[in-house]
Amino acid sequence: MQEIKCKSKEEFLDYVKKAKIIIAYADMSLPIWKYFVCSIGDLHLRLITYNNKSVIEVLAVDTFKQYWTKVPDRKYYFVMKSPDGYGAIAPAKSDEEAERFLEGWVYGKK
């Protein structure tokens, strides 16, 4: 997987805003990641980091939309723990709300 290490909050948010699909909270310990990475391919994902914050940019947009979402117009997705421990990749309620959340997350605002 490619990685971009950002030097500032602004650079991090700029990469996030320019991406077509972002998956936040990259908890790669959940079993869902193994299946996700196998279906999309390691070379089609990019880790964007700043300090201890990281998100995944999906570069294979068409493949992701075909196999991983029922909401094809959504840009932001979150990894969620599920009761079975497997995990799920769920779309944000709205892209605007997710963008505000990520800005607050990076700047440490609640």
Image: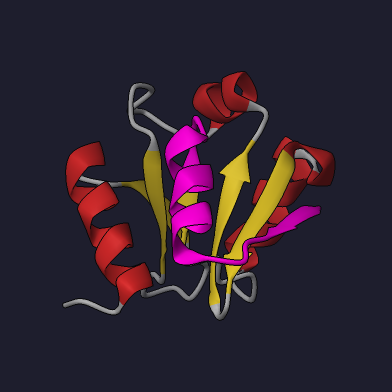
Q: Quick one: 101 or 72, which is closer to the camera?
A: 101
Q: Which stretch is magenta?
A: 1-22
Residue drawn at x 79%, y 40% as measured from the top left: 41
- Identify whether 83 is placed above or below 40: below
Question: Where, by quadrant of the figure, is residue 6 drawn?
Answer: bottom right
Q: Quick one: 78 or 11, which is closer to the camera?
A: 11
> Can see residue 107?
yes
- Image check: 66 left or right of 38? left
Question: Where, by quadrant of the figure, is residue 91 drawn?
Answer: top left
- Image check: 49 left or right of 4? left
Residue drawn at x 64%, y 76% as measured from the top left: 29
- Identify whether 23 is placed above or below 40: below
Q: Position of residue 21 (x, y in %)?
A: 49, 36
Q: Position of residue 35 (x, y in %)?
A: 69, 51
Residue drawn at x 57%, y 78% as measured from the top left: 51
- Image check: 102 left or right of 85? left
Q: Position of residue 32 (x, y in %)?
A: 59, 60
What scheme was used to colour the molecule? secondary structure
Q: Where is residue 76 in the image (x, y as percent from the top left)?
A: 37, 43
* Magenta residue check for 105: no
- Identify whether 106 is placed above or below 10: below
**Quadrant of the rendering where the C terminus is positioned:** bottom left
> Can see residue 94?
no
